[in-house]
Image (cartoon, grey):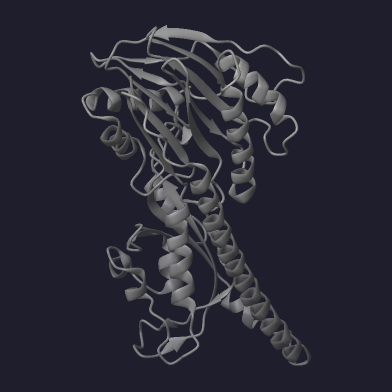
Amino acid sequence: MREPQIDYAAVFRALPGMVALLTPELVYADANDDFLRLAGRTREQLLGRYIFDVFPDNPNDPAATGMRDVKASMLRAVATGERDTMALQRYDVEDPQRPGHWQERYWSPVNAPVLNSDGQVVLIVHRVEEVTELIRARGGAGGDSRARVLEAELYTRARELQEVNERLRQAHAREREVALALQAAMLPAPSPLPHHRAAVRYRPAISALNVCGDWYDLVELSGGRITVAVGDVVGHGLEAACVMGQLRSALSAAARVAQGPAQALEALGLYARSVDGAESTTVVKALIDWESHTITYSSAGHPPPALLHPDGTVTFLDQATDPPLGARPEHVHRPQASTPFTEGATLALYTDGLVERRQEDIYTGLARLADSLTRHRKSDPEPLADALLADLLPSTGTTDDTALVVIRL
Protein backbone atom coordinates (compact mmCIF):
# COMPACT_ATOMS: atom_id res chain seq x y z
CA MET A 1 0.00 0.00 0.00
CA ARG A 2 1.36 3.36 -1.00
CA GLU A 3 2.06 5.69 1.91
CA PRO A 4 0.13 8.97 1.80
CA GLN A 5 2.08 12.14 1.08
CA ILE A 6 1.66 14.42 4.10
CA ASP A 7 2.16 18.16 3.94
CA TYR A 8 3.64 18.63 7.41
CA ALA A 9 3.80 22.41 7.04
CA ALA A 10 0.04 22.47 6.47
CA VAL A 11 -0.48 20.12 9.41
CA PHE A 12 1.59 22.40 11.65
CA ARG A 13 -0.37 25.50 10.66
CA ALA A 14 -3.68 23.72 11.36
CA LEU A 15 -2.67 22.29 14.77
CA PRO A 16 -5.20 23.18 17.47
CA GLY A 17 -3.70 25.26 20.24
CA MET A 18 -0.85 27.74 20.20
CA VAL A 19 2.42 26.28 18.88
CA ALA A 20 5.54 28.14 17.76
CA LEU A 21 8.98 26.94 16.65
CA LEU A 22 12.09 28.77 17.81
CA THR A 23 15.80 28.33 17.12
CA PRO A 24 18.17 27.55 20.02
CA GLU A 25 18.94 31.30 19.97
CA LEU A 26 15.23 31.90 20.77
CA VAL A 27 14.40 33.37 17.37
CA TYR A 28 11.01 32.59 15.83
CA ALA A 29 11.24 30.06 12.97
CA ASP A 30 7.48 29.50 12.53
CA ALA A 31 4.13 29.76 14.32
CA ASN A 32 0.81 28.06 13.66
CA ASP A 33 -2.47 29.86 12.96
CA ASP A 34 -3.80 29.61 16.51
CA PHE A 35 -0.60 31.10 17.91
CA LEU A 36 -0.81 34.07 15.56
CA ARG A 37 -4.50 34.61 16.25
CA LEU A 38 -4.38 34.40 20.03
CA ALA A 39 -1.11 36.32 20.33
CA GLY A 40 -2.47 39.04 18.06
CA ARG A 41 0.55 39.04 15.75
CA THR A 42 1.11 38.36 12.06
CA ARG A 43 3.64 35.84 10.80
CA GLU A 44 5.76 38.69 9.45
CA GLN A 45 5.87 40.26 12.90
CA LEU A 46 7.33 37.07 14.36
CA LEU A 47 9.56 35.19 11.92
CA GLY A 48 13.25 35.92 12.28
CA ARG A 49 12.78 37.98 15.44
CA TYR A 50 14.00 37.35 18.98
CA ILE A 51 11.03 36.25 21.08
CA PHE A 52 11.49 38.85 23.80
CA ASP A 53 11.79 41.69 21.30
CA VAL A 54 8.27 40.73 20.20
CA PHE A 55 6.95 39.96 23.70
CA PRO A 56 8.84 41.98 26.34
CA ASP A 57 7.70 42.25 29.94
CA ASN A 58 5.08 44.84 30.83
CA PRO A 59 7.18 47.91 31.76
CA ASN A 60 4.34 49.13 33.99
CA ASP A 61 4.58 46.03 36.22
CA PRO A 62 7.80 46.05 38.29
CA ALA A 63 6.96 42.53 39.57
CA ALA A 64 6.69 41.00 36.10
CA THR A 65 8.75 37.81 35.76
CA GLY A 66 7.22 36.23 32.65
CA MET A 67 10.12 37.01 30.32
CA ARG A 68 12.72 35.78 32.82
CA ASP A 69 10.83 32.56 33.55
CA VAL A 70 10.07 31.69 29.92
CA LYS A 71 13.65 32.41 28.86
CA ALA A 72 15.04 30.19 31.64
CA SER A 73 12.70 27.35 30.62
CA MET A 74 13.68 27.56 26.95
CA LEU A 75 17.39 27.64 27.73
CA ARG A 76 16.99 24.61 29.99
CA ALA A 77 15.36 22.73 27.12
CA VAL A 78 18.31 23.67 24.88
CA ALA A 79 20.93 22.76 27.51
CA THR A 80 19.42 19.44 28.62
CA GLY A 81 17.67 18.26 25.46
CA GLU A 82 14.63 17.52 27.63
CA ARG A 83 11.08 18.89 27.79
CA ASP A 84 10.48 21.68 30.31
CA THR A 85 6.93 22.22 31.59
CA MET A 86 6.30 25.55 33.26
CA ALA A 87 3.90 26.59 35.97
CA LEU A 88 1.05 28.95 35.15
CA GLN A 89 2.47 32.31 34.06
CA ARG A 90 1.06 35.81 34.10
CA TYR A 91 2.62 37.40 31.05
CA ASP A 92 0.97 40.63 29.88
CA VAL A 93 0.96 41.37 26.15
CA GLU A 94 0.96 44.76 24.48
CA ASP A 95 -2.18 45.44 22.45
CA PRO A 96 -1.04 45.51 18.79
CA GLN A 97 -3.86 47.95 18.00
CA ARG A 98 -3.02 50.30 20.87
CA PRO A 99 0.71 50.64 21.49
CA GLY A 100 1.46 51.32 25.13
CA HIS A 101 -1.63 49.51 26.36
CA TRP A 102 -1.04 46.13 28.01
CA GLN A 103 -3.50 43.27 28.31
CA GLU A 104 -3.42 41.05 31.40
CA ARG A 105 -2.89 37.51 30.11
CA TYR A 106 -2.30 34.08 31.68
CA TRP A 107 -0.46 31.25 29.93
CA SER A 108 0.46 27.60 30.55
CA PRO A 109 3.66 26.95 28.49
CA VAL A 110 5.63 23.82 27.61
CA ASN A 111 9.00 23.93 25.83
CA ALA A 112 10.16 20.76 24.08
CA PRO A 113 13.47 20.34 22.17
CA VAL A 114 13.72 18.90 18.66
CA LEU A 115 16.96 16.91 18.26
CA ASN A 116 18.89 16.02 15.13
CA SER A 117 20.57 12.65 14.56
CA ASP A 118 23.60 13.78 16.61
CA GLY A 119 21.44 14.61 19.61
CA GLN A 120 21.82 18.37 19.13
CA VAL A 121 18.89 20.69 19.77
CA VAL A 122 17.93 22.34 16.48
CA LEU A 123 14.48 23.74 17.37
CA ILE A 124 12.30 24.41 20.39
CA VAL A 125 8.60 23.57 20.20
CA HIS A 126 6.93 26.29 22.30
CA ARG A 127 3.38 25.13 23.05
CA VAL A 128 1.14 27.48 25.02
CA GLU A 129 -2.35 27.21 26.45
CA GLU A 130 -3.95 30.65 26.81
CA VAL A 131 -6.03 30.40 30.02
CA THR A 132 -6.88 34.03 30.68
CA GLU A 133 -10.63 33.50 30.34
CA LEU A 134 -10.49 30.48 32.65
CA ILE A 135 -8.70 32.52 35.30
CA ARG A 136 -11.25 35.31 34.93
CA ALA A 137 -14.25 33.02 34.94
CA ARG A 138 -17.02 34.23 37.22
CA GLY A 139 -19.90 32.26 38.66
CA GLY A 140 -22.39 35.15 38.99
CA ALA A 141 -22.68 37.70 41.76
CA GLY A 142 -22.58 35.13 44.54
CA GLY A 143 -19.66 33.25 42.98
CA ASP A 144 -17.56 36.30 42.12
CA SER A 145 -15.68 36.42 45.41
CA ARG A 146 -15.18 32.65 45.37
CA ALA A 147 -13.84 32.83 41.83
CA ARG A 148 -11.39 35.54 42.83
CA VAL A 149 -10.20 33.41 45.75
CA LEU A 150 -9.78 30.39 43.47
CA GLU A 151 -7.96 32.52 40.91
CA ALA A 152 -5.54 33.83 43.51
CA GLU A 153 -5.01 30.38 44.99
CA LEU A 154 -4.40 28.77 41.60
CA TYR A 155 -1.89 31.41 40.63
CA THR A 156 -0.16 31.23 44.03
CA ARG A 157 0.09 27.42 43.92
CA ALA A 158 1.49 27.58 40.40
CA ARG A 159 4.16 30.05 41.47
CA GLU A 160 5.00 27.91 44.51
CA LEU A 161 5.35 24.87 42.26
CA GLN A 162 7.75 26.72 39.99
CA GLU A 163 9.82 27.83 42.99
CA VAL A 164 9.96 24.23 44.27
CA ASN A 165 11.08 23.04 40.83
CA GLU A 166 13.79 25.68 40.79
CA ARG A 167 15.07 24.53 44.20
CA LEU A 168 15.10 20.94 42.93
CA ARG A 169 17.13 22.00 39.90
CA GLN A 170 19.61 23.76 42.17
CA ALA A 171 19.84 20.67 44.38
CA HIS A 172 20.53 18.50 41.31
CA ALA A 173 23.21 20.97 40.23
CA ARG A 174 24.90 20.74 43.65
CA GLU A 175 24.70 16.94 43.55
CA ARG A 176 26.25 16.98 40.09
CA GLU A 177 29.16 19.11 41.32
CA VAL A 178 29.80 16.78 44.27
CA ALA A 179 29.51 13.67 42.09
CA LEU A 180 31.90 15.07 39.49
CA ALA A 181 34.41 16.05 42.19
CA LEU A 182 34.18 12.54 43.63
CA GLN A 183 34.60 11.00 40.19
CA ALA A 184 37.60 13.19 39.40
CA ALA A 185 39.26 12.03 42.61
CA MET A 186 38.68 8.38 41.71
CA LEU A 187 39.77 8.71 38.07
CA PRO A 188 43.29 10.16 38.23
CA ALA A 189 45.55 10.39 35.20
CA PRO A 190 47.41 7.08 34.67
CA SER A 191 51.02 6.71 35.70
CA PRO A 192 53.45 6.83 32.77
CA LEU A 193 53.74 3.47 31.03
CA PRO A 194 57.29 2.26 30.32
CA HIS A 195 58.12 2.88 26.65
CA HIS A 196 54.47 3.44 25.74
CA ARG A 197 52.01 6.32 25.74
CA ALA A 198 48.42 6.48 26.94
CA ALA A 199 45.72 9.15 27.13
CA VAL A 200 42.52 9.10 29.17
CA ARG A 201 39.44 11.32 28.92
CA TYR A 202 36.18 11.70 30.81
CA ARG A 203 33.34 13.92 29.57
CA PRO A 204 30.26 14.32 31.79
CA ALA A 205 26.77 14.41 30.32
CA ILE A 206 25.01 17.74 29.87
CA SER A 207 22.16 16.47 32.04
CA ALA A 208 22.56 16.43 35.81
CA LEU A 209 20.73 13.09 35.80
CA ASN A 210 23.21 11.19 33.62
CA VAL A 211 26.67 11.75 35.04
CA CYS A 212 29.26 9.74 36.93
CA GLY A 213 28.61 6.14 35.89
CA ASP A 214 31.61 5.69 33.57
CA TRP A 215 35.15 4.80 34.60
CA TYR A 216 38.52 3.62 33.33
CA ASP A 217 41.47 1.86 34.95
CA LEU A 218 45.05 0.99 33.94
CA VAL A 219 47.20 -1.41 35.95
CA GLU A 220 50.88 -2.15 35.29
CA LEU A 221 51.80 -5.83 35.77
CA SER A 222 55.09 -7.70 35.74
CA GLY A 223 56.76 -8.84 32.55
CA GLY A 224 56.01 -5.73 30.53
CA ARG A 225 52.26 -6.19 30.62
CA ILE A 226 49.40 -3.86 31.50
CA THR A 227 45.68 -4.32 31.91
CA VAL A 228 43.21 -1.65 30.90
CA ALA A 229 39.47 -1.55 31.61
CA VAL A 230 36.54 0.72 30.84
CA GLY A 231 33.14 0.37 32.48
CA ASP A 232 29.69 1.94 32.68
CA VAL A 233 27.40 1.81 35.74
CA VAL A 234 23.65 2.09 35.17
CA GLY A 235 22.63 5.03 37.32
CA HIS A 236 23.39 8.67 37.91
CA GLY A 237 24.75 11.19 40.36
CA LEU A 238 26.34 10.36 43.68
CA GLU A 239 24.93 6.83 43.77
CA ALA A 240 26.50 5.95 40.42
CA ALA A 241 29.80 7.59 41.40
CA CYS A 242 29.96 5.53 44.61
CA VAL A 243 29.12 2.27 42.81
CA MET A 244 31.65 3.12 40.13
CA GLY A 245 34.34 3.61 42.77
CA GLN A 246 33.63 0.24 44.38
CA LEU A 247 33.64 -1.66 41.08
CA ARG A 248 36.73 0.09 39.77
CA SER A 249 38.68 -0.69 42.97
CA ALA A 250 37.51 -4.32 42.99
CA LEU A 251 38.45 -4.87 39.34
CA SER A 252 41.82 -3.18 39.83
CA ALA A 253 42.56 -5.57 42.68
CA ALA A 254 41.30 -8.61 40.76
CA ALA A 255 43.51 -7.72 37.79
CA ARG A 256 46.61 -8.19 39.92
CA VAL A 257 45.81 -11.80 40.86
CA ALA A 258 43.54 -13.12 38.08
CA GLN A 259 44.91 -15.35 35.31
CA GLY A 260 43.36 -13.15 32.63
CA PRO A 261 40.62 -10.63 31.82
CA ALA A 262 37.82 -13.23 31.83
CA GLN A 263 38.71 -14.45 35.31
CA ALA A 264 38.94 -10.85 36.56
CA LEU A 265 35.44 -10.12 35.22
CA GLU A 266 34.12 -13.31 36.81
CA ALA A 267 35.41 -12.13 40.18
CA LEU A 268 33.95 -8.68 39.59
CA GLY A 269 30.59 -10.19 38.68
CA LEU A 270 30.47 -12.15 41.93
CA TYR A 271 31.38 -9.02 43.90
CA ALA A 272 28.79 -6.91 42.02
CA ARG A 273 25.99 -9.11 43.37
CA SER A 274 26.63 -7.65 46.82
CA VAL A 275 26.69 -4.01 45.67
CA ASP A 276 23.36 -2.23 45.34
CA GLY A 277 23.14 -0.47 41.98
CA ALA A 278 25.88 -2.57 40.34
CA GLU A 279 23.54 -4.84 38.39
CA SER A 280 23.62 -4.44 34.60
CA THR A 281 27.00 -2.69 34.71
CA THR A 282 28.94 -3.17 31.48
CA VAL A 283 32.73 -3.43 31.40
CA VAL A 284 35.48 -4.53 29.03
CA LYS A 285 38.96 -5.55 30.13
CA ALA A 286 42.08 -6.11 28.04
CA LEU A 287 45.53 -7.47 28.88
CA ILE A 288 48.32 -6.09 26.68
CA ASP A 289 51.50 -8.20 26.47
CA TRP A 290 54.32 -6.45 24.61
CA GLU A 291 56.61 -9.47 24.69
CA SER A 292 54.16 -11.68 22.75
CA HIS A 293 52.50 -8.72 20.96
CA THR A 294 49.03 -9.94 21.90
CA ILE A 295 45.88 -8.40 23.35
CA THR A 296 43.73 -10.72 25.46
CA TYR A 297 40.28 -9.39 26.24
CA SER A 298 36.84 -10.12 27.66
CA SER A 299 33.67 -8.04 27.59
CA ALA A 300 30.62 -7.97 29.87
CA GLY A 301 28.03 -6.42 27.57
CA HIS A 302 30.28 -3.48 26.66
CA PRO A 303 30.99 -1.88 23.25
CA PRO A 304 34.02 -3.56 21.63
CA PRO A 305 37.51 -2.01 21.86
CA ALA A 306 38.88 -0.67 18.60
CA LEU A 307 42.32 -1.75 17.38
CA LEU A 308 43.81 0.73 14.89
CA HIS A 309 46.50 -0.93 12.77
CA PRO A 310 49.46 1.08 11.39
CA ASP A 311 48.02 0.83 7.85
CA GLY A 312 44.84 2.64 8.98
CA THR A 313 42.49 -0.33 9.11
CA VAL A 314 40.41 -0.84 12.26
CA THR A 315 39.41 -4.11 13.92
CA PHE A 316 36.76 -4.25 16.63
CA LEU A 317 37.55 -6.79 19.35
CA ASP A 318 34.14 -8.46 19.59
CA GLN A 319 34.95 -12.18 19.86
CA ALA A 320 34.54 -12.48 23.64
CA THR A 321 31.30 -10.73 24.55
CA ASP A 322 29.01 -11.85 27.37
CA PRO A 323 26.03 -10.29 29.23
CA PRO A 324 26.56 -7.40 31.72
CA LEU A 325 27.41 -7.99 35.37
CA GLY A 326 24.64 -9.62 37.37
CA ALA A 327 22.60 -10.50 34.28
CA ARG A 328 22.75 -14.25 34.98
CA PRO A 329 21.34 -15.79 38.19
CA GLU A 330 24.13 -18.36 38.34
CA HIS A 331 27.89 -18.15 37.94
CA VAL A 332 29.12 -18.97 34.41
CA HIS A 333 32.70 -18.76 33.10
CA ARG A 334 33.13 -15.73 30.85
CA PRO A 335 34.66 -15.97 27.36
CA GLN A 336 38.10 -14.67 26.50
CA ALA A 337 39.83 -14.06 23.17
CA SER A 338 43.27 -12.96 21.96
CA THR A 339 44.47 -11.06 18.92
CA PRO A 340 47.98 -10.10 17.75
CA PHE A 341 49.11 -6.53 17.20
CA THR A 342 52.06 -4.91 15.47
CA GLU A 343 54.31 -2.20 16.84
CA GLY A 344 52.75 1.23 16.28
CA ALA A 345 49.13 0.08 16.50
CA THR A 346 46.67 1.93 18.75
CA LEU A 347 44.05 0.51 21.11
CA ALA A 348 40.95 2.54 22.04
CA LEU A 349 38.51 1.56 24.80
CA TYR A 350 35.44 3.72 25.41
CA THR A 351 31.94 3.83 26.84
CA ASP A 352 28.72 3.97 24.83
CA GLY A 353 28.39 7.74 25.16
CA LEU A 354 31.07 8.04 22.47
CA VAL A 355 29.23 6.04 19.80
CA GLU A 356 25.53 5.65 20.64
CA ARG A 357 22.92 8.16 19.47
CA ARG A 358 19.14 8.23 19.68
CA GLN A 359 17.34 6.62 16.76
CA GLU A 360 20.62 5.40 15.27
CA ASP A 361 22.01 1.91 14.83
CA ILE A 362 25.06 1.22 17.00
CA TYR A 363 26.98 0.11 13.91
CA THR A 364 26.66 3.63 12.51
CA GLY A 365 28.44 4.96 15.58
CA LEU A 366 31.12 2.29 15.36
CA ALA A 367 31.71 3.14 11.70
CA ARG A 368 32.05 6.80 12.66
CA LEU A 369 34.63 5.85 15.30
CA ALA A 370 36.60 3.72 12.81
CA ASP A 371 36.62 6.55 10.28
CA SER A 372 37.91 9.03 12.86
CA LEU A 373 40.64 6.64 14.02
CA THR A 374 41.77 6.10 10.44
CA ARG A 375 41.88 9.82 9.65
CA HIS A 376 43.93 10.60 12.77
CA ARG A 377 46.06 7.42 12.78
CA LYS A 378 49.35 9.36 12.77
CA SER A 379 48.44 11.34 15.89
CA ASP A 380 49.90 10.55 19.30
CA PRO A 381 47.46 9.35 21.99
CA GLU A 382 46.82 12.79 23.57
CA PRO A 383 45.85 14.64 20.36
CA LEU A 384 44.13 11.49 19.06
CA ALA A 385 41.90 11.34 22.17
CA ASP A 386 40.96 14.99 21.69
CA ALA A 387 40.26 14.43 18.00
CA LEU A 388 37.98 11.46 18.72
CA LEU A 389 35.93 13.49 21.19
CA ALA A 390 35.72 16.42 18.77
CA ASP A 391 34.65 14.18 15.88
CA LEU A 392 32.15 11.99 17.72
CA LEU A 393 30.61 14.13 20.46
CA PRO A 394 28.21 16.96 19.54
CA SER A 395 29.57 20.41 20.39
CA THR A 396 26.56 20.92 22.67
CA GLY A 397 27.38 17.75 24.64
CA THR A 398 25.50 14.47 24.98
CA THR A 399 22.90 13.06 27.35
CA ASP A 400 25.31 10.31 28.47
CA ASP A 401 28.77 10.60 29.97
CA THR A 402 31.81 9.29 28.10
CA ALA A 403 35.06 7.65 29.15
CA LEU A 404 37.91 7.03 26.70
CA VAL A 405 41.34 5.37 26.91
CA VAL A 406 43.82 5.50 24.01
CA ILE A 407 47.08 3.47 24.12
CA ARG A 408 49.88 3.42 21.54
CA LEU A 409 51.11 -0.17 21.31
Q: Is residue 321 above or below residue 96?
A: above
Q: Is residue 272 above or below residue 226?
A: below
Q: Is residue 11 visible?
A: no
Residue 130, position as x, y percentages in the image: 54, 71
Residue 146, position as x, y percentages in the image: 76, 87
At x 65%, y 76%, the residue is 160
Q: Is residue 130 visible?
A: yes
At x 30%, y 63%, the residue is 47
Locate residue 213: give its quadrant.
top right
Locate residue 245: give its quadrant.
top right
- Residue most extreme to the front: 222
In the displayed structure, does residue 262 sit left or right of residue 369? right
Residue 162, position as x, y percentages in the image: 60, 71
Q: Is residue 248 above or below residue 45?
A: above
Towards the viewer: 246 or 226: 226
In the displayed structure, does residue 287 sit left or right of residue 192? right
Locate residue 299: give its quadrant.
top right
In the displayed structure, does residue 387 sit left or right of residue 56? left
Count all numbered tags in the image, as a single digit: 0
In the displayed structure, does residue 81 sit left or right of residue 275? left
Q: Is residue 90 above or below residue 394?
A: below
At x 56%, y 14%, the residue is 260
Q: Say which quadrant the C terminus sits in.
A: top left
At x 39%, y 7%, the residue is 292
